[in-house]
Image (cartoon, helix red, strand yellow):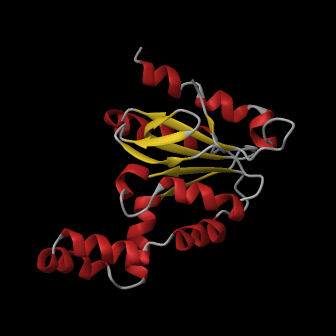
Amino acid sequence: MAIINRRLDKIIPKIKEDKFIQGRGLGNEISFYIFDYNPSEELIVRDYVKHIKKEFSFNGSDRRIIEFDLYKMLLDIAKEKRIFDRVFEVEKKQGKDALFKALTTFAKPEIFLKKIKENVGDHNVLFITGVGKVYPFVRSHTILNNLQEVIDKIPVIMFFPGRYDGQSLQLFGKFKDDNYYRAFPLVD
C-alpha cells in the first residue's frame, strides 16, 4: 500500500477522537491541523476528502463537516463581483501580470473569511482545500492566520499540497509560503 494511502487512512480515526473536537492539549491551543502531501497525489487526496465527508454524512453523526475549496470560492467571488467574464480578456489583452494584479486586488483574505463565517453554520469540522489551485492569488498562511478570528473552537484541517514541518509551509515543496506555528500536523 502506498504511503499516501496509509496516511489518508489515519484521518477518519483522528476525526472520530473526542480530543479532536474538544481541542488539543491543556493550553487550549487552536485546533488547526495540516495534512500535507506530495502535489502529485492531489487527485488521490481529493477523492479521499469526498470519502471522508461521505463517511460522516449519515443522520445522527456527531461530526458535521463542511469543505471550503479556496479556488471555487475565488471563482464565486469573481462572479459575484462581475469580473469573471473579464478575467480572460485582461489576460489576453494585458498579459499575466495584469491578470495577477487584478485578481489579487479583489481576492482579499477578508472576503474569504467572511464567506467562511457566513456559511459554517452548525458544522463542527472545517476542511480547507484548493490551496494549490488558488496559488498565487490567495496564500494559505494568510487564511490560516486570520481564520482563528472567525472560527472559534471548530477544528480546521487544511489539505496542503507540499510540506509542513510544524513551523513553515512549503507549497508544492518549492515555494515557502510563510512560517506558521499554530497548526499541528494531522498525521505522521
* Left or right relative to 174: residue 168: right
* Left or right relative to 50: residue 118: right
Residue 135: quadrant of the picture: bottom left
Residue lying at 68% horizontally and 49% vertically, measured from the top left: 64
Q: x, y percentage for residue 172?
A: 35, 41
Q: How many marks?
A: 0
Q: x, y percentage for residue 3?
A: 44, 19
Residue extending furthest toward the top:
1
Please, is residue 54 above or below residue 76 in the view?
Answer: above
Of residue 153 and residue 164, the one placed in the foreground of this image is 164
Question: Which quarter shows the C terminus?
Answer: top right
Residue extending furthest toward the left:
93
Please, is residue 182 above or below residue 100 in the view?
Answer: above
Q: Is residue 143 visible?
A: yes
Residue 92: quadrant of the picture: bottom left
* Left or right relative to 171: residue 20: right
Residue lying at 71% horizontally and 63% vertically, measured from the top left: 149
Q: Is residue 50 visible?
A: no
Residue extending furthest toward the right:
26
Residue lying at 41% horizontally and 84% vertically, measured from the top left: 81
Residue lying at 71% horizontally and 33% vertically, measured from the top left: 16
Of residue 113 and residue 179, the one placed in the foreground of this image is 179
Q: x, y percentage for residue 62?
A: 76, 44
Q: x, y percentage for residue 137?
A: 38, 64
Question: Which quarter shows the N terminus?
Answer: top left
* Left or right relative to 40: residue 96: left
Of residue 1 and residue 143, the one placed in the foreground of this image is 143
